[in-house]
Image (cartoon, rainbow, N blue to C red):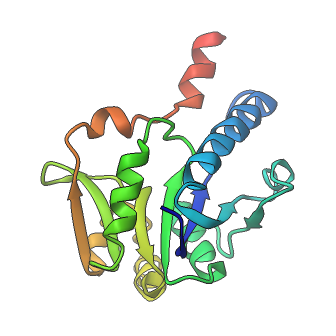
Amino acid sequence: MKTEKITAIILPRENKVYNKPAIEMKEEVAIRTLHNLIGLFCNKILISANCSQSHMFTNEIVVRDEINVGQIGSIISCLKESTTKKNLIISSDMPLVPAGLLRLLCEKKDEADFIVPASGTETIEPLCAIYDKSLIPALTQMIEMGDYNIYNLPQYCKTKFVQVYNGNDIFRNLNIRHQLAKKK
């Protein structure tokens, strides 16, 4: 079910600790895995990367942050670069996200500006969600207000919550920092 109406955006994990080459290698493997999965649904893929990461992605469209405020800055930069109204954003440290959930999010893309998986009533996963390009002003407003927490986005826009019942398992992060700490 490929659609040219959705751009995929992969957000690499922010790596600020330990053995940089080992982290970058795991990051590249995770991104390649997601790249292959997302390729089932989207024809165009963007990768958000800071300057130190950009050398890892020679065959992809790499977008650098315009402003350095974490994930929210990466999302704004990628939405500005995207040529489609709807965008599937996913963090590279979520290797267990099933294709079925990505398909469901893509199918619901027109139901709101922000389509986000939710476990129960309060836990959402905004780093595996559909973002409409029209969210750029809301995201910019969040930054201007000093709210850099992407989990607060539903307070600023029309949101559709897609219930998932195994969220703790499918959104389990590839916690590179803790994995490396255990090896030392």
Judge whether residue 14 can be spotted in this image: no
Nearer-the-camera pick, 97 or 159: 97
Residue shown at 76% from the left, 66% from the top: 61
Residue shown at 41% from the left, 68% from the top: 130
Residue shown at 67% from the left, 61% from the top: 48
- Looking at the image, is 52 positioned above or below residue 22? below
Nearer-the-camera pick, 85 or 123: 85
The image shows residue 88 at horizontal and vertical percentages of: 48, 65
Residue shown at 48% from the left, 61% from the top: 1
Looking at the image, residue 70 sits to the left or right of residue 156; the answer is right
Residue furthest toward the left?
121
- Looking at the image, is 93 positioned above or below residue 44? above
The image shows residue 121 at horizontal and vertical percentages of: 12, 54
Nearer-the-camera pick, 182 or 112: 112
Judge whether residue 18 can be spotted in this image: yes
The image shows residue 14 at horizontal and vertical percentages of: 62, 47
Nearer-the-camera pick, 139 or 93: 93
The image shows residue 164 at horizontal and vertical percentages of: 23, 47
Looking at the image, residue 124 sits to the left or right of residue 83; the answer is left
Q: How many marks on residues?
A: 0
In which quadrant of the rendered view does residue 20 lie?
top right
Quarter of the image with the C terminus is top right
